[in-house]
Amino acid sequence: MLTVHGGGEVSGGSYRRPMTIIGMLYFVTGAISWLNGPLTVFVKLAFRLDDAQALLVTVVFYVPYFVFALPYASVLRRIGMKRGMAAGLGVMSIGALLFSQFVGLHSYPGVLSSLLVVGTGLSLMQAAYNPYVSVLGPIDSAARRVAAMGICNKTAGILAPYAFAALVMGGVGEFVKRVKAAPTPAAAQALLNDFAARLHWPYLMLSVVLVVMAVFVARSSLPDIKPSTANATMRNGETGGSIFAFPHLWLGVLCIFTYIGAEVLAGDAIGLYGQNLNLPLDETRHFTSYTLFAMLVGYLVGLSVVPRVVSQQRYLVISALLAVLLSVGAYASQGYAAIALIAALGFAHAMMWPAIFPLAIRGLGRFTETGSALLIMGIVGGAVMPQLFAHLKRLYDFQLVYMVLTVSCYLYIMYYGLRGHAVGTRLSSITASSLSQPEAAGNSRALRPGWLARHGMASHRRRGNRP
């Protein structure tokens, strides 16, 4: 029987049941999130936009993470994470329904407002299921659990653009020629209206699916876990006086900001990157899937080596270094070679979130919900970086702009993996060296009560909490 003990970890020898349900949620939200890439190309054509206007899709999608994350932390403390996930699905269904109506009316402001609603629901989902997965078991193996969920997310992300292309982007090259050859502006507008309306029924059906899922999750057997008791502290056995007592968390927020910004540039903006290289539209519509396939491979590799062979923070450093090399290589390349290197960034990105999130919330104790919300706020980087790219490339070479933005992000991520994750914690002076060594799952030296006692750190197990 599946039970939850005081520390918050699920017993019974397996997390299979809750992980299966959460994996389903990651799959659906991955499909919706990673449609932003082909959707950006779609709205650029359907509404005759420039790159900056088309990339407003990512702005309205990610801004709710910044605006609502902290209020959601308070909401989740009241209603619990399980109900929070169900509520997030419900809000997303409303957004999808609104989208289906506004796209049929050929209203770009309406489309953006509906995506804002979808992003609002998705941010509630993220605020609930990210810390849930992290504290479902030992924090030192959290990267493995998050990576497993990432496989669900990115598998959906690979499939969704192909489904999107099959449903609404078929013959897009010929469509562009027909619009250009239209005898009158009214005839061209009629073609564009019909093109935009292709998304009406798919998003209407998506709304129905999300409602069904919301009801299923609300009635499911997901255990209620309180992160505040599951995520034990590392500060001399104390939880700290305020959220400001954990500088490694605040550095982690900035790390999430830079990571998401770079990830969205590699995933959602890769199609626009290809268009700037004058590659055919019929091919650029699939580029997001290439990035996500590389991420899927990266997850599989990460699952096989973290933490058995290398610790999650050391793998984060290796990933950031690889990303720097790939970004520089893309700048020095042209055509499909540059696209291949941008897509390969997906491999380097794969284990960044799974490593950053648990490192940043490690030891927050009763501040775990608030800390998780702050990290979710960092996802707004997905709105900021693409806009910086779109505006700066008007002034400078677009490949140079891309490289400067992404390399800056990766260098900071490298710092966080090396030092930032331990700033202000006992790890910075006592355990950093030992935690940088490969840790066998369930047999970490830093978790042994005798070792903790010798270093003046209270044993969390003796207090009934889990580290």
Image (spheres, helix red, strand yellow):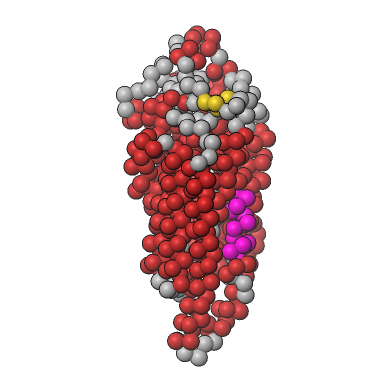
Question: In this view, which residue lies farthest toward the left?
Answer: 241
Q: Looking at the image, is 390 positioned above or below residue 436?
A: below
Q: Position of residue 218 (x, y in %)?
A: 48, 42
- Asked if residue 136 shows in the view, the reply is yes
Residue 160 covered by magenta stretch = yes
Q: Closer to the camera, 252 or 420? A: 252
Q: Position of residue 87 (x, y in %)?
A: 43, 46
* Residue ID at (65%, 59%): 337
Q: Quadrant of the N terminus?
A: top right
- Asked if residue 457 shows in the view, the reply is no
Q: Closer to the camera, 400 or 369? A: 369
Residue 57 covered by magenta stretch = no
Left or right placement of residue 117 versus residue 14 in this view: left
Q: Closer to the camera, 348 or 232? A: 232
* Residue ID at (46%, 82%): 189
Left or right placement of residue 347 versus residue 217 in this view: right
Quadrant of the rendered structure where residue 352 is?
A: top right
Left or right placement of residue 209 versus residue 70 in this view: right
Magenta span: chief secondary structure: helix
Magenta span of residues: 153-165
Q: Position of residue 274 (x, y in %)?
A: 58, 64
Question: In this view, which residue lies farthest toward the bottom?
Answer: 183
* Residue ID at (54%, 9%): 450
Q: Position of residue 446 (x, y in %)?
A: 54, 18
Q: Give the tally of numbered discs.
A: 0
* Residue ID at (48%, 87%): 187
